[in-house]
Amino acid sequence: MAPCSQYIVDYRLEACNTSGKKQPHVFKHMHPEKLIELENGAVIAVEEYGDPNGMPVIFCHGWPSSRTMARLADEPARDLCVRIVSPDRPGISGSSLQSDRKLTDWPRVVEQIADALNIRDFRMLAISGGAPYAYATAVAMRERVRAIAIVGGAPPIAEVSDTNGLLPMYRWMLTLYRTRPQLLRRLFYLAQPILSLRPPVRLRPLVLKMLLLRPCDAESLRNAAAFEAIFESQRRAWRASAEGVIADAQIYAEPWGFSIEDVSIPVRLWHGKQDRAFSVHLAEELAKRLPDCNARFIDDAGHYSLPIRHMREILEDLMSC
């Protein structure tokens, strides 16, 4: 570990200040990655997108995924003067593995990231499996989180009585987790070498065909930049650690540790009517439970095409809160 004289903190957001507490260190490299050392000695890897001097939005990546998923928001964020801060969750890609972590541990990590980057208050943008993390932060840090946008977000799966609204793969994973957890863990390790590979460009149409996607999703992912943002972020997660991907997956199968009704700040909920991962009916039920929710259910949009095609609208709407 480098001596303190080599730590450089990013002070680009002039309008923000901190609480006066001792700040975590930020290690800057030649590439965009920052490594933020937390109070427990663990490291969280962060990348930024959009306008470095813009209004801050903390990005919550999906599952299995990593911080580079935020590339989806880079161009519209630059145009809208939005600063996207995208961390890897513990055990994912460049971040330290945290054993036995709970969803409710995440807000303290976000607090340290924000303090390290001199961000006082912020909004959050969560895609798919990032949703529980945004909700948890909104409950624990309501004085600093101004609003959250949830895009194709995962519901509290432990509370879902009819799992037919989940992707079939999620249903069998959930069954194995509850009945044969060691087998599921073994399958994750067997899958890691394959899912860590980067498919050649010429094979991408075959990959999309094998995934049995909705037509709107398959069409959106034919865009090279969108394909890279989605699948390269997944590959980074798998390549780094099967254990990290497993730890992240376990969060979804367990109770969140708070009620969705406790999310009192504004929620902008976006969901595609063609979403196969989490059906629109699950999103509609969740929207009814949120105290301050503006929900938009989009025709001819699926789990992937919604953030790919509508990111500018999503960011514009979030920043209006």
Image (tube, rainbow, N blue to C red):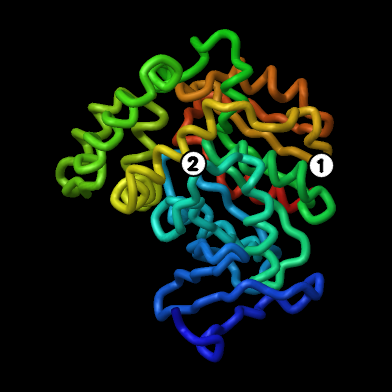
Residue 141 in the figure: left or right of residue 161: right
Q: Is residue 169 among what the camera can see?
A: no
User: What's the residue type where badge 2 is placed?
Assistant: Gly
- Residue 133: x and y in percent read 62, 42
- Residue 36: x and y in percent read 55, 69
Badge 1 crowding class, 10 Å Cα cut-off, few under 14, some 14 to 19, many 20 or more, is many
- Residue 102: x and y in percent read 59, 40
Residue 23 in the figure: left or right of residue 251: right
Residue 184 in the figure: left or right of residue 207: right
Q: Which mark is residue 74?
A: none
Q: Nearer the viewer, residue 272 or 234?
A: 234
* Residue bearing mark 2: 62
Q: Is residue 308 among what the camera can see?
A: yes
User: What's the residue type where badge 1 is placed?
Assistant: Ile
User: Compared to 55, does 239 lie above or below?
Assistant: above
CA distance separating discs 2 and 1: 22 Å
* Residue bearing mark 1: 265
Q: Earlier in the sequence, mark 2 or mark 1?
A: 2
